[in-house]
Amino acid sequence: MSRVITLDGPAGVGKSTIAKRVAEHCGIAYLDTGAMFRIVAKTLGPKNVAVPDEELARALASLSFSLSGSGGGTSLACNGEVAGQEIRTEEVGKLASDYATRPAVRAYLKKAQQDLGKAYSLVAEGRDMGTAVFPDAPYKFFLDASPEVRALRRVRQLAENGVIEDVAKVTRQIRERDEQDRNRALAPLKAADDAIVIDTSNLTVAQVFQTIAQALDE
Ligand code: C5P
């Protein structure tokens, strides 16, 4: 039987980095569900975000997700293609957050995520993994940090890749996306009652990983 470990939290908290490490530690795949919402946003574009649900459901039906590999080497493909850096911009993130309020999108991706969870053991990271998609997962974690800390981390990460961004602007964007993700009617961002909540503000990646690995090994 496959097993699922859930890892939820807000934008820029470091979920992907930690999810990859935990997946590597456990020898299983990791599922970046934010990437699924980003792929929907990038593929359907701004013009489809407000179309009626049935129309949206028809467009979504042409998207098929698959996983291969494990640990840090896991790759998620949509219709056989692995998405690149083009889905990683804050603009695509915001459009993904807009699509994420639509019932047709949530229903379609929830089913796709649950199907992948049946086929593979996973570290599933996102916003609603522990609350809505895998409520029976035996291990659930929720990472948190203030918007300022998350913005600073993101700006530093971008700077390492030669991209200079303004901290105040990134903080604003992160707050805006948090607000929308926490307050939407369907599957809002929140920790499951039985999740272990880790405030990562003053922790290194290694310390966060250690906390999770310890809980898993207990
Ligand atoms: O994690 P990432 O920033 O890539 O997610 C992009 C957006 O997709 C989020 O802001 C959120 O609105 C949406 N999302 C979601 N549920 C998930 C994962 C992502 O609603 N499980």
Image: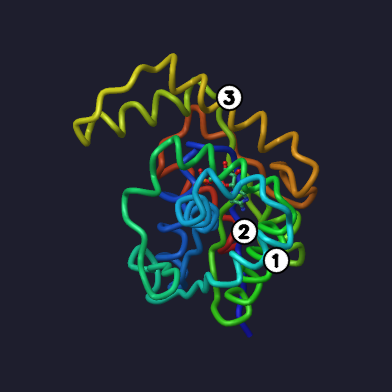
Amino acid under label 2? Thr
| Helix, strand or loop under label 1 | loop
Q: Residue furthest bottom?
A: 1
Amino acid under label 1? Ala
Which image quadrant for residue 170? top left
Of residue 112 and residue 59, the one placed in the foreground of this image is: 59
Q: Tell me the quarter of the image containing the N terminus.
A: bottom right
Residue 50 in picture, x, y percent from top left: 66, 45
Query: Up-down: is 96 above or below 64?
Result: above
Left/right placement of residue 158 relative to residue 168 reads: left
Q: How many labels, in total? A: 3
Neighbourhood count class around disc 3 (C-alpha, 10 Å): few under 14, some 14–19, many 20 upward: some
Left/right placement of residue 53 relative to residue 38 reads: right
User: Do residues under tags 1 and 2 come within 8 Å of each other at their CB atoms?
Assistant: yes
Residue 175, which numbered label? 3
What residue lies at 38% left-to-right and 68% top-to-bottom?
75
Residue matched to label 2 = 6
What residue lies at 62% left-to-right and 31% top-to-bottom?
178
Q: Whole-Å distance between the Cαs marked 3 and 1?
A: 29 Å
Say whether disc 3 or disc 1 marks the residue closer to the N-terminus. 1
Query: Up-down: is 29 above or below 97?
Result: below
Which image quadrant for residue 58? bottom right
Residue 137, which numbered label? 1
Say whether disc 3 or disc 2 marks the residue closer to the N-terminus. 2
